[in-house]
Image: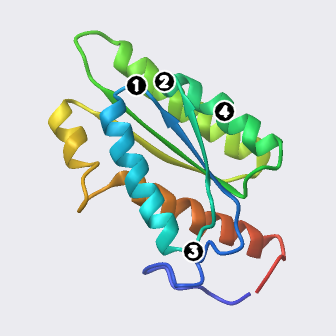
Amino acid sequence: MGERSAEKPTARDLDAGDLRIAVVVSRYNLDISRRLLAGALEALERMSATDPDVVWVPGALELPVAALTLAEGGQADAIVALGCVVNGETAHFQYVAGECAAGLMHVQMDTGVPVAFGVLTTFDRDQALARSGPKHNKGAEAAETAVEMANLVRRLQGGSD
């Protein structure tokens, strides 16, 4: 297989032309989630993804079960999980953010289908807006991660050189 550059992904690493990509999006903090989704879909289009599935769920805690269903059903080579959890006055933030991340990690470890974590966990709304804008969009970054990992998994499994 040879050593791959650790510096940055190649064009081949980010080619989604023959991948099935699903995007699971939380409706909670909907305006931020829409911005993340727009960034993810723009990035997927740049990477030649065709017609990614978009699935909406009520909140961040529901992202893992939707991702698991898609992964187990063979409906996706990679999944992009998007949402926004903003810190409040209680410990609720830590539980939601931590359990969402853990659940999504379990999905990819249990199924072998990469799940990119594009869930913002911010201390305030301004931080969420800054990370979901046109110049700096964590949804776009998550989409790139999902595609790169799907291609890597395929290569490691002997699917292509």
Q: Which residue was labeled with disc 1?
A: 28
Q: x%, y% of residue 152?
A: 67, 71
Is residue 68 left or right of 4 when viewed as pictured?
A: right
Q: Residue at x 71, y 45 (%)?
A: 109
**Mark 3 and mark 1 in contact (Cβ < 8 Å)?**
no
Q: CA distance from mark 3 to mark 2?
A: 29 Å
Q: Residue at x 48, y 31 (%)?
A: 26
Q: Earlier in the sequence, mark 4 or mark 2?
A: 2
Amino acid at dot 2: Gly
Q: Residue at x 45, y 21 (%)?
A: 96
Q: CA distance from mark 4 to mark 2?
A: 11 Å
Task: Tell me the element at label 1.
Answer: loop
Q: Foreground mark, 3 or 2? A: 3
Seen from the viewer's position, the closer of residues 21 and 156 is 21
Task: Tell me the element at label 3.
Answer: loop
Q: Which residue was labeled with disc 2?
A: 59
Q: Which residue was labeled with disc 3?
A: 48
Amino acid at dot 4: Ala
Q: CA distance from mark 1 to mark 4?
A: 15 Å
Task: Tell me the element at label 2.
Answer: loop
Is residue 16 left or right of 97 when viewed as pictured?
A: right
Q: x%, y% of residue 3?
A: 62, 87
Is residue 67 left or right of 74 when viewed as pictured?
A: left
Q: Residues within 10 Å of mark 1 (few under 14, many from 20)?
A: some
Scheme by which the image is coloured: rainbow
Q: Which mark is residue 66?
A: 4
**Which residue occupies the extreme bottom position in the image?**
2
**Which residue occupies the extreme front position in the image?**
51
